[in-house]
Image: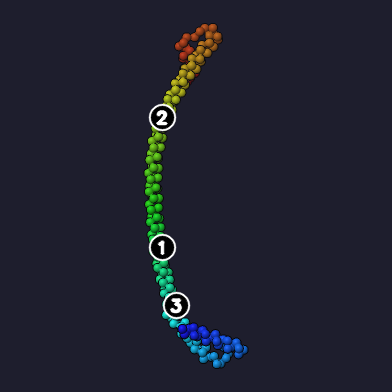
Amino acid sequence: MSLSAVIVAAAAAAEDAAEAGGLPQLDMSTWPSQLFWLAVTFGILYWLMAGRFLPAIGGAIEERRDRIADDLDQASDFKRQADEAEDAYNQSLADAKAKAQSIAADTRAEVDAEIAEMQVETDAKLQEKLDAAEARIAEMKEEATAKVDEAAADATRAIVERLIDEAPTDDAVARAMTNIAR
């Protein structure tokens, strides 16, 4: 009830000041009551701020500071875990590369061995074909030489027969061909 009495007194003072025609703040007769209410209001506001608002704000600030510190700790843990995961990944990648290179080298060696074996087989087959071809060539050469010798002997016989009107014997033609071949 004292609050309502204060409000009524303040309203009455405002009416009196309006009738007096000046600013009520400058009226020296109201200064003691203004100073009283200033002190009461300041005391209540101080009590509310010191007892209720500032501890709540301080608690919120402290809670936020703790949450930030926890978040930083958690972030450093996550960074450490990420670094460990990256190291493990790099290690497994290096192991996989080494294994792949080993497999590639083994495969390359197997393929090279197979190629060398195939090349040996192919070379042997080609050598057989080459030997057979050389044998046929030598045979054809002998046949051609025999045919050329036979043709030369026939030509010699025909020439001698025409020149001397007598047919030479086979032994004479063979001796003549032997003398020419030397």
Task: Look at discs 2 and 1 and give the one toward the viewer.
Answer: 1
> Label 3 neighbourhood size at 10 Å, few (<14), some (14-19), many (20+)?
some
Q: Residue at x 55, y 9 (%)?
A: 162
Q: Earlier in the sequence, mark 3 or mark 1?
A: 3
Amino acid type, mark 3: Phe
The residue that mark 3 highlights is 53
Q: Which residue is drawn at 55% across and 88% down?
A: 13
Please name the amino acid that badge 2 sits on: Lys
Which mark's residue is nearer the viewer, 3 or 1? 3
Q: State the residue in front, 23 or 72.
A: 23
Question: Which residue occupies 51% across, 12% down?
Answer: 154
Find residue 79 and name its label: 1
Residue 62: % across, % down: 41, 74
- Answer yes or no: do the residues labelled 3 and 1 have beta carbons within 8 Å? no
Disc number for residue 141: none
Residue 95 or residue 77, whichever sits in front:
77
Q: How crowded is mark 1: few (under 14 residues within 10 Å), some or many (20 or more)?
A: few
Q: Which amino acid does label 1 sit on?
A: Lys
- Residue topped by disc 2: 125
Distance from label 3 to label 1 (Cα)?
38 Å
Instruction: Report the residue at 52% width, 13% height from top.
Output: 155
Label 2: how many residues lie within 10 Å, few (<14), some (14-19) or many (20+)? few
Quarter residue 128 falls in:
top left
